[in-house]
Each structure stands twice: as structure tokens, then as C-alpha cells.
Image: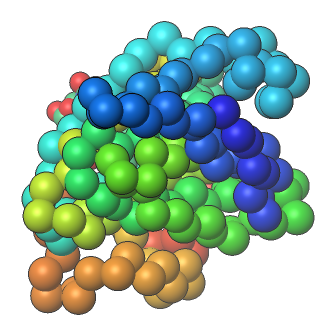
């Protein structure tokens, strides 16, 4: 398992060591000890989520604030997504900057996104099944979000605008200029 810190401090790309043979492949998809070591934290993931989406779906940008703030570990079980993390930590030198990476069942990469980040993804393949771990439980009242098409963020979702599929909640989400930092 190989960890690379992105330009956003505390946000890591994780690449597993894949063992291939005539039967197929094997890899360790999750190691709490290695994550704790690299992040120098006592992080523990307590909720797993899974979603299925078709091409053009954009989910996000979401986060939870306060006591239910979440660290997320994102991977793709089927298909291909563009995963996006935006640093909204108030005093961070990279506040407002985003990091995007393609995650797929083929490249088996994962993205570790600490608390204090907005998160979202777009679906680049016909279908994508995304699975992610969280270190705090879902709490509706702690949710905050930003419109993924906020001009200030200018995220290239790699989907033509007319093909984008957003939830009603995400369509009417506030612009990034109105967002209160984490
Ligand atoms: C996130 C979540 C949603 N739900 C429910 C609420 C709602 O009725 C239904 C669908 O929720 P949403 O529309 O918010 O699902 P979705 O748009 O997929 O939300 C997710 O987006 C990605 C980008 C994230 O980073 C996640 O943290 C989460 O916010 O599922 C739970 O029961 N538990 C959960 O943990």
C-alpha cells in the first residue's frame, strides 16, 4: 500500500499493492494501521457508504461540520469517477483549492480526505459504484454543501453541462462565495 500526499496537506492518494496470477488478483483494500501511521492519528472508520450512479451524475459538494465532521476514504468498486476534494479549513494556506483524481475499479486508487474538506465526484463511465468509509456517523443537521457548479471554484467535472445529473438538493445548494469556512 503506497501513500502519496496531495498538494492539499493531509489529503492522500492510496495505491494498493496488487498481486495478479492466473486466478485474477488480490489486494489489501484497507489497512487501519497504515492509515493511522501515515496520518499520525487515531482515526477510526465507523460507517461505510455505497452509491451507484450513471454517467453524468455529479454528487456533491458535501461535508459535515461540528461534532459530526467526517474524514472519508473513497474508492470505486465498479466504473470510473472524477473524485474532487476542496480544502475549506479556515486557516489553511490552500483554502479554496481543489484536488481532482480519477478513481476506478481498474486503477484501484483511493482518496483519503480529512475533515475540513468539501467532497464530490462525477461519473465518467456508464455506471459507477462508489464505496467510502467515514469516521463519524451521518447526521443530517451537520450537513453543509456547495453547488458543484460554483463559478469561483471552476471545477472541471469532465462532463458536458447538458449531460450533468444533480440531485435537487445539490442544484439549489449555495454558491461557494456564501460558504462559511470549516
Ligand atoms: C450521506 C447519507 C445519506 N443518507 C440518506 C439521506 C438521503 O435520503 C439519501 C441520499 O442522500 P444524499 O442525496 O445526500 O446522497 P449523496 O448525494 O450521495 O451524498 C453523499 O455525497 C458524497 C459526495 C459524499 O461525500 C457523502 O458524504 C454524501 O454527502 O440517503 C443516509 O441515510 N446516510 C448517509 O450517510
Apparent side of residue 40 relative to residue 164 in the rendered image (left or right)? right
Q: Quadrant of the N terminus?
A: top right
Q: Is residue 63 visible?
A: no
Please name the residue shown 52% across and 64% down the image.
Answer: 101
Quarter of the image for residue 24 reads top left
Q: Provide residue 143's location: percent of width, then percent of height.
A: 43, 38
- Residue drawn 57% across the image and 36% down it: 16
In front of the other: 117 or 108: 108
Vertical side of 100 occupied by 88: above or below: above
User: In the picture shown, does residue 115 fall above or below 27?
Assistant: below
Q: Quadrant of residue 149?
A: bottom left
Residue most toward the front? 22
Please name the residue shown 18% across and 70% down the image.
Answer: 56
Model colouring: rainbow
Instruction: Answer with the quadrant where ligand 1 appears in the image.
Output: top left
Nearer to us in this view, 166 or 28: 28
Amino acid at each position: 500500500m503506497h501513500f502519496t500526499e496531495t498538494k492539499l496537506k493531509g489529503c492522500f492518494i492510496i495505491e494498493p499493492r496488487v498481486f495478479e496470477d492466473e486466478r485474477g488478483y488480490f489486494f489489501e483494500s484497507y489497512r487501519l494501521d497504515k492509515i493511522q501511521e501515515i496520518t499520525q492519528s487515531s482515526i477510526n472508520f465507523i460507517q461505510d457508504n455505497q452509491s451507484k450512479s450513471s454517467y453524468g451524475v455529479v454528487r456533491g459538494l458535501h461535508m459535515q461540520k461540528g461534532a459530526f465532521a467526517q474524514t472519508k476514504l473513497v474508492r470505486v468498486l465498479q466504473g470510473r469517477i472524477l473524485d474532487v476534494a476542496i480544502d475549506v479549513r479556515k486557516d489553511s494556506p490552500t483554502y479554496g483549492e481543489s484536488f481532482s483524481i480519477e478513481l476506478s475499479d481498474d486503477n484501484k486508487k483511493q482518496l483519503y480526505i480529512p475533515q475540513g474538506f468539501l467532497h464530490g465526484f462525477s461519473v465518467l463511465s456508464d455506471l459507477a459504484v462508489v464505496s467510502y468509509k467515514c469516521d463519524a456517523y451521518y447526521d443530517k443537521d451537520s450537513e453543509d454543501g456547495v453547488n458543484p457548479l460554483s463559478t469561483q471554484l471552476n471545477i472541471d467535472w469532465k462532463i458536458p453541462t447538458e449531460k450533468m445529473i444533480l440531485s435537487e438538493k445539490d442544484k439549489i445548494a449555495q454558491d461557494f462565495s456564501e460558504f462559511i469556512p470549516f
